[in-house]
Every structure is written in C-alpha cells, then in structure tokens.
Image (spheres, rainbow, N blue to C red):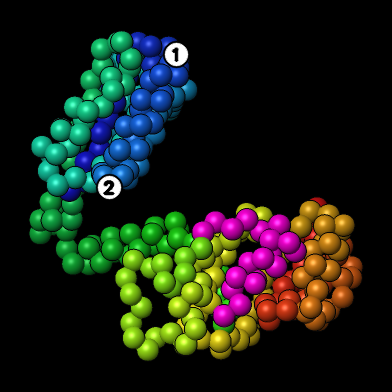
C-alpha cells in the first residue's frame, strides 16, 4: 500500500527558520535508510505558508488567497510518499524518524493513498483504462533513452580511446566472469569469458552504456551520436580526435544551423555528428 506522510508545520517552520546542520544530516541518514529498504518513493520540505497561495472553490467562483495562513497546526511543512506493507509498518518506520522540528514539538501524520479498488463499482472499466493510460504516460515522461553500444570484443579498447579523445569518465565495468550468475553454456564465443559484459561511461552530460557482446560481430548502422560542444575550437579538437584511425564523412564546415558541423566515423565504426549549437 502507498501512504503519504505529512510533517505538520510549527512556529519555527512558519517563521522560515532553517533546520540545523545536525538535523539535516540526521534526516539525510534516515531518508537513505528508507530508500535502501524500498520504502521511500518521494519526499520534500515545503517553504512556509507566507510563500504559498490558496485557491478557494465555491461553485463556479475561484478566490485567490495569499499566505501566510493562520492555522499553523493544520499546515504541512514537508512530506514523504512511502510504499509499505501495512499502516503498522509505516508507524514503525516513522517512530525511527528524528524529530523533524528539532527540539520543537511537532506532529507527523500518515494517510493511506487511494487505490483503484477503493472506489468500488463507480470506478468503471472505462475509467480504469483511462487511469492506466495516464499512469503509463507519466511513467514514460520520467523515462530516458540511452545508447547501448556493442563493440564485438573491442570494448576495453574503445573505453581507453574515448577517455583520450572525449575525456570520457568511466563509471563502471563488469566482465562476463565477474557476473553474479554464470553465463549460459554456448552463449559466449571462445575467449570472451574475460570480455566486458556491461559498462557505462559519461561524455559531457550523456551516459552511454556498452558491452563487448557475445562474439566479434558488431555493426553500427542507421544511427549517429550527435555531439554538441560550446566552441569551434572544441569542435575541431573532438572531431580530429574521433577521426584518428577512423574516417571523415563530412569535413567540419559552417552550415545554416551551425557555425561548425561535421560527420566522422571513428575506428570502431561509431558514427558521430560534431556541431556547435547556434547561440
């Protein structure tokens, strides 16, 4: 079940008094424990109500009311969203929480979130389908797409190349013989036991994932990686580095969409488009 956990406001939180460094550290440790246990799904602190706005609904009328709001004990200063097995489990976790207002007395409230079955027959199959579609859309809004490259046995060489050419930062590397489970018989080509099963590296703000694959067959066709750099000098440097041992498909030139744009295929067969965005 999912629950919302509300930290009620206090006089100090409404006055905008920030928590102490020790409380921030204690709450950070508590949140880390919640995440590791798979309990915490979201959470944040709220600014005092003096920075808030209410909209009052009365029939077709809408009235905007600026904060602060007087009912301190009814206000919320922060929240979590938890996924727990029961309210009892939520209570046990909440008892472990540091006092959220430091030395000041405060209340923390746990409220179950509605699940589809709670609405009974009023929540028709058509409405359930619409809700499921909305949840799918929201999930995809938070999704990300990353390139995953298979180097056919040359992954380690490629990582070293991109470290030099692109100043790539290697995040992690795991080989087939380091996996938590044995590779199924016959899956790997002979000699691939020590090859890279999975790795990730970062170029600028983009994280790229890669592998040697299960054999020496790799073909990079039908796509290119688009690299945007802030200056023409940076474009020249990256382009020339990528072209080392590779092939220039289109020299760096000025185009109507970029002061510096070119295409190159590096020595591993990865196609790149290097450009300086229009400022």
Q: Residue at x 68, y 81 (%)?
A: 269
Q: Residue at x 18, y 51 (%)?
A: 115
- Point out the tag, 2 or 1, that comes first from the N-terminus: 1
Q: Position of residue 252 (x, y in %)?
A: 87, 71
Q: Residue at x 70, y 68 (%)?
A: 161
* Residue named by callout 2: 38
In this rendering, position of residue 18 left or right of residue 76: right
How many marks can you see?
A: 2
Asked which secondary structure carries label 2, the reply is: loop
Q: Is residue 30 above or below residue 114?
A: above
Q: Is residue 85 above or below residue 156?
A: above
Toward the viewer: 243 or 155?
155
Give residue 13's quadrant in the image.
Answer: top left
* Residue named by callout 1: 17
> In the image, is residue 41 part of the stretch drawn in magenta?
no
Q: Tell me the magenta residue range.
A: 153-172
Q: Which mark is residue 186?
A: none
């Amino acid at each position: 079940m999912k629950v919302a956990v509300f930290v009620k406001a206090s006089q100090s939180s409404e006055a905008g008094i920030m928590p102490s460094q020790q409380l921030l550290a204690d709450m950070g440790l508590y949140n880390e424990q919640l995440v590791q246990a798979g309990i915490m799904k979201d959470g944040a602190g709220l600014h005092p109500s003096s920075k808030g706005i209410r909209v009052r609904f009365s029939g077709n009328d809408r009235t905007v009311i600026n904060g602060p709001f007087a009912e301190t004990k009814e206000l919320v200063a922060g929240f979590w969203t938890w996924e727990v097995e029961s309210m009892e489990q939520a209570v046990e976790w909440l008892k472990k929480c540091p006092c959220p207002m430091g030395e000041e007395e405060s209340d923390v409230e746990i409220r179950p979130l509605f699940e589809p079955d709670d609405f009974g027959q009023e929540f028709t199959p058509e409405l359930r389908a619409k809700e499921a579609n909305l949840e799918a859309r929201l999930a995809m809004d938070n999704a990300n797409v990353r390139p995953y490259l298979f180097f056919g046995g040359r992954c380690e060489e490629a990582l070293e190349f991109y470290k030099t050419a692109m100043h790539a930062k290697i995040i992690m590397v795991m080989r087939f013989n380091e996996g938590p489970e044995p590779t199924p018989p016959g899956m790997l080509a002979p000699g691939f036991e020590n090859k890279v099963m999975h790795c990730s590296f970062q170029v600028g703000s983009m994280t790229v994932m890669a592998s040697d694959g299960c054999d020496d067959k790799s073909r990079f066709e039908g796509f290119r990686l688009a690299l945007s750099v802030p200056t023409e000098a940076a474009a020249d440097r990256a382009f020339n580095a990528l072209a080392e041992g590779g092939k220039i498909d289109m020299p760096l030139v000025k185009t109507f969409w970029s002061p510096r744009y070119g295409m190159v295929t590096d020595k591993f067969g990865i196609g790149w488009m290097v450009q300086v965005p229009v400022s």
